[in-house]
Image (cartoon, grey):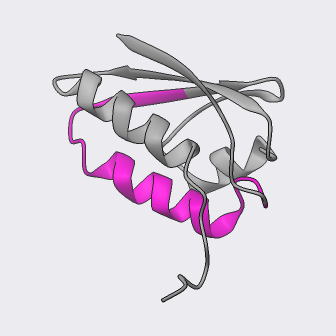
């Protein structure tokens, strides 16, 4: 198991669109399991509703735990996404 704690940097927090991006990225790591812990609770990344239920806002911290065959790369990727400044729609 790999664990990493990061701060949410997206100004709007982790709302529907970032949650969708995060869940889709998690699905790319077949055979890996993810657990996200915040002050508001702990969820796995198998459901967008679970992630949204944490109500993550800018400045909140989350701990990402990954287990599985690609746990190091998977945890790094999830950490990167939780710290990402999402811009919808993207600016050109």
Establish if 52 lies above or below 83. Answer: below
Q: What's the residue at 69%, 54% (across, down)? A: 10
Q: Position of residue 70 (x, y in %)?
A: 19, 28
Establish if 72 lies above or below 12. Answer: above
Q: Position of residue 75 (x, y in %)?
A: 37, 29
> Is residue 7 located in the magenta-colored stretch of the structure?
no
- Residue numbers of the magenta segment: 12-35
Which quadrant would residue 66 be assigned to in this image?
top left
Q: Which is nearer the eye, 17 or 9? A: 9
Would you say 30 lies left or right of 87 here?
A: left
Q: What's the residue at 80%, 38% (across, down)? A: 59
Would you say 45 lies left or right of 36 here?
A: left
Residue lying at the far front in this picture: please name it: 92
Q: Position of residue 62 (x, y in %)?
A: 66, 28
> Is residue 19 located in the magenta-colored stretch of the structure?
yes
Residue lying at the far left in this picture: please name it: 69
Quadrant, the N terminus: top left
Q: What's the residue at 83%, 29% (across, down)? A: 40
Which quadrant would residue 63 be assigned to in this image?
top right
């Amino acid at each position: 198991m790999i664990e990493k704690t990061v701060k949410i940097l997206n100004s709007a927090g982790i709302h529907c669109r970032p949650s969708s991006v995060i869940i889709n990225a998690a699905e790319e790591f077949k055979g890996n399991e993810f657990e996200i812990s915040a002050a508001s609770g702990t969820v796995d990344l198998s459901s967008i509703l679970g992630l949204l239920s944490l109500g993550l806002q800018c400045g909140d911290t989350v701990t990402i735990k990954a287990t599985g065959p690609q746990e190091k790369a998977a945890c790094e990727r999830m950490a990167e996404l939780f710290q990402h400044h999402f811009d919808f729609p993207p600016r050109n």
